[in-house]
Image: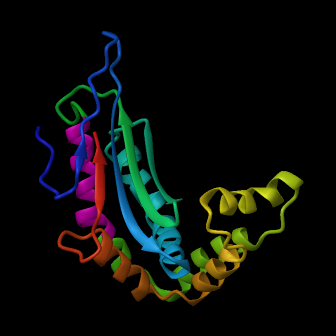
Amino acid sequence: APLRATGAPVRAAPAPTARDEANYAAVYSYQTGKGADARAATLALSAVLEAPFYESLRTTQQLGYIVQAAARQREGVSSIVFLAQSARDDDKCKGPADLAAAIDGFLDDRAPAILGKLDGAQLNDVADGIARQLEELPKSLGAAAGPHWDEIVSERRDWDRRAREAAALRKLTPDDVRALFAAAFAPGGAARRPLLVA
């Protein structure tokens, strides 16, 4: 089946050269913005969708043996990656286009329903847990140096970024998270910048 016309740049992965290679994957990456507020909403949205995404594609549909939704940050830009890898070859799933369609289905149908039910108490639990991780004191010299090294390598030198992100997480509302999804993930969203690798 052809990949859906999502408006996303599509990078087609080369066909495997080994005859016994049956694995294939689809990876969507959605950029969500820069700054502490965008990062906070991205982390919360990822945390809210991670388990339902896994449950939908891995447990219910049994489409992939690797299924993941995770927040990322590269060069100061936050994103969420949705990944599925499979070796199925049946009527339900034959290749990366079928995995991409399943990811699209989750983002088009299931994610909006989940976010529609998101309330303040649920979001506060999620956001507070992430904020606590950001504020956790390092347990080793390597853990203490790691975040600073990231700032040096990226040339941002934003030493209190994690504290600002934790504070932004604690101010998030369900409407903030829904607004990010509508802008960055929904078809026609003003800030929608997906990339599909399949």
How are the colours assigned in the image? rainbow
- Report the predominant secondary structure element of the magenta stretch: helix
What residue occupies the far top of the structure in this picture? 19
Say whether residue 130 is left or right of residue 110: right
> In the image, which residues are magenta?
96-111
Q: Position of residue 99 (x, y in %)?
A: 27, 42
Q: How many marks?
A: 0
Quadrant where the N terminus is found in the figure: top left
Residue 5 vertical placement versus 123 (above, below): above
Residue shown at the point (36%, 72%) measured from the top left = 114
Residue shown at the point (47%, 71%) measured from the top left = 42
Q: Position of residue 141 (x, y in %)?
A: 88, 55
Q: Nearer the viewer, residue 77 or 197?
A: 77
Picture quarter containing residue 88? top left
What residue occupies the far front of the structure in this picture? 155
Q: Position of residue 35 (x, y in %)?
A: 52, 77
Residue 120 vertical placement versus 198 (above, below): below
Say whether residue 195 is left or right of residue 76: left
The answer to whether any part of residue 175 appears in the image is: yes
Residue 162 vertical placement versus 31 (above, below): below
The answer to whether any part of residue 117 appears in the image is: no
Picture quarter containing residue 177? bottom left
Q: Nearer the viewer, residue 65 or 131?
A: 131
Quadrant where the C terminus is found in the figure: top left
Residue shown at the point (31%, 19%) measured from the top left = 16
Q: Is residue 45 magenta?
A: no
Q: Is residue 98 magenta?
A: yes
Q: Nearer the viewer, residue 165 or 111?
A: 165
